[in-house]
Amino acid sequence: MIGLSHYLIFSTVLFGIGIFGMLSRRNAIAVLMSVELMLNAVNVNFVAINRFVTSGQAAGQLFSIFVIVVAAAEVSVGLALIISIYRHRKSVDLNNFDLLKW
Amino acid sequence: MLEFSLHNAWLIPLLPLLAFALIGLAMHRWPSVSAMISILSIGISMLLSALVAVLVFSLSPGEIYEASVRWLSMPGLQVNMGMLVDPLAAVMLVVVTGVAFLVQVYSLGYMKGDPGIASYFGYQSLFAASMLGLVLANNFGQIFVFWELVGVCSYFLIGFWFGKYSARDAAIKAFVTNRVGDFGFLLGILFLQIVFGTLNFQELSAAIPGYTNAAVLLPIAVLLFFGPVGKSAQFPLHVWLPDAMEGPTPVSALIHAATMVAAGVYLVARAFFIFNAIPQAMTLIAIVGGLTALFAASIAIAQNDIKRILAYSTLSQLGYMMMALGVGAMTAGVFHLMTHAFFKSLLFLGAGSVIIGMHEEQDIWKMGNIAPKMPVTTWTFIIGALALAGIPPLSGFWSKDEILLGAYASGHTGLYILGVLVAFLTAFYMFRLVFVAFFGKNTAGRDKAHESPAVMTIPLLVLAVAAVLAGLVNSPLMHHVFGHFINAPGAIQPHPNTAIIVFSTLAALSGILLAWLIYQREVIKAEVIKEKFSMAYKVLYNKYYIDEIYGWLGVRLVDGAARVLFWFDIHVINGFVNLTAWFTGKSGETLRYTEDGQVQTYAIYMFAGVVIVLITALCGVFTALA
């Protein structure tokens, strides 16, 4: 029987992969994708806890939909920024984006 | 009428105060009107004072009239304002109003043509109001207020000719020196309020004899004595009084000889019950007074400025009064205060008349043989000098004799000998002044000398009569009536002693004789003595270098303190500020290398932060569970 803890372990692993990708990838698009992974780990948590802890209500599911909407908006802005940077720098390598350095 | 004057004694200070307000606010454009208002108000005050005195002295001794109103009140503190009319206050009222009236009349002549006459009379009125308020005050708080008011009037009038640097400096010196004394005085008053919960003289005099904690009372008494030391110019705060002679001469006569400087003596007499409860405080007062008397008298011998000689003489006589109070002869001290007020203001006004007659000349060696030109001034001055020297039967004789008697009878033989010595010195320096200035060989200045107008000579004559007769009130001729009224529990009332009278008179006569031999007959050449004792003469001429010592100390102390503080500022305060700046700069320089501009580095910091917060929170949860 698959219980709440399985979902939580799954989401933790997913979140960890997301963090790792976000911190280690040099490609801006890959970083954006990692962020999506982290958001989806959160979504899994929302839905799982909604199902197993407060099954009579729909708040968790609603919030996961909110997160998906906001994530879609975020990705569109993020991709727009990356494209803009790419046009200037001919690169999407984050190591090159260090204008704020001392 | 008598009852009215007693119950409305508050009118006595109020009238001059109104005159001051009227002159200051409305009449200052009309000098002669201002002068008239001032003289009129003090004249009415004088009549009221005389009525009060007549009534008080017709009551039985010890009977007093007191009235007070609440001034401000809060839990634990009630401040009253009131008046206390007793024989002591009545005597002071008569002396202050009488001398003030005569001095103001005299000022009409002396200040003639001065552009500041209106403000001069305004200040005179304010001074009279403050001084009379001080005399009538029935508690220490009120006395302190008026004490400061007379001080500020003194400041205004010393610096009246503020165009002169010396006058300005003298005014500031007087004010600052008095500040030192008044600070102690105020502390003493505050301690009284804290310890006894009242400042009223009557209540305090009832409370103090039962209070035995000398460890508390002694500091209070010493702090209170600070005030009189400053105001009555006792050693070591005497330095302001000789310089105060920069003011107009009538001011010197009224404020710096007859009344304000006597306020310190009055205060000690008023608070006699406090000081008398502490033998050490009394000894301190007696010694300070005695030392001042001798010290100032010796300086007076070597001075050449007519007003400065009189100023040092005033110092010396104030010391005499303090000494009298200190040995417990309260009657004698107040008695001398009264007689001194008359003859010393007479001497100052006489000196003013000479200065006017000689066209602003103050050096006695440049006068010489002006007696034939200025007969009234000369003879009244000689009467004043004889009274000061203590020649019977003039007023100074009776009061000085009582002081010496008090010192002797109370067992202070050292102070008695000192007193006789001072009496000798007093006679000597006064007649040095008289012989040199009025009968000297120098004729250079004589031709321009002229007698002063009647408006100046009449006050001289009136004061001369007072200087002759004022002593009789406490003489055997009038059965010591003064002493029956002016007395305090515990004060001594010695019986007359013929030997003391003879000795003090002999001392005074020999002083006069010596002055006559040296400065008139020139049997002994003054120059020879000066040569022989040139060291001593120099020390006396330079007033024991006290001013120089204070100046040096002031420079040393202020300069030294400034240097130390400067070092502290530069190395400690500034160093600390610089250290802070240096630390901030250095840490910024070091920490900036952590900012590499990589968004992922920042994300690591964020994540690390979240992890730390999480671990801390979890630890908290676990400890709570455990």
Image (tube, coloured by chain):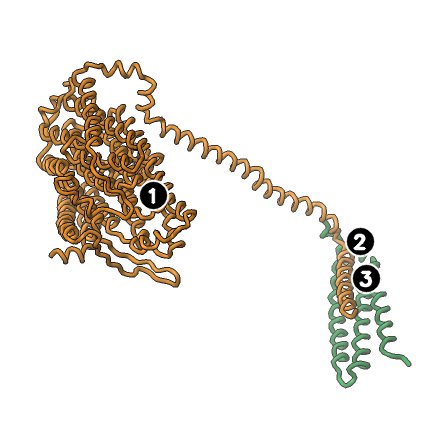
Chain in green?
A
Toward the viewer: B189 or B459?
B189
- Residue B159 lies left or right of residue B281; in this view the side is left
Q: Chain of mark 2?
A: A
Question: If the image is split into quadrants, where does the N terminus of chain B sit?
Answer: bottom left
- Of helix, strand and loop, which one carries label 2? helix
Toward the viewer: B504 or B515?
B504
Q: Amino acid at mark 1?
A: Gly
Name the mark on residue B450: none
Name the mark on residue B227: 1
Task: Count every numbered label the image shows and give the total.
Answer: 3
Q: Which residue is mark 2?
A: A95
Name the mark on residue A22: 3
Residue at the (80%, 78%) spot, across then down: A49
Q: Earlier in the sequence, mark 3 or mark 2?
A: 3
- Residue B221 lies left or right of residue A42; in this view the side is left
Toward the viewer: B224 or A10?
B224
Q: Position of residue B215 (x, y in %)?
A: 43, 47
Q: Chain of mark 3?
A: A
Mark 2 vs mark 1, CA separation in Å: 83 Å
Please state which of the two labelled residues, at mark 3 or mark 2, is closer to the viewer: 3
Q: Position of residue B503 (x, y in %)?
A: 21, 28
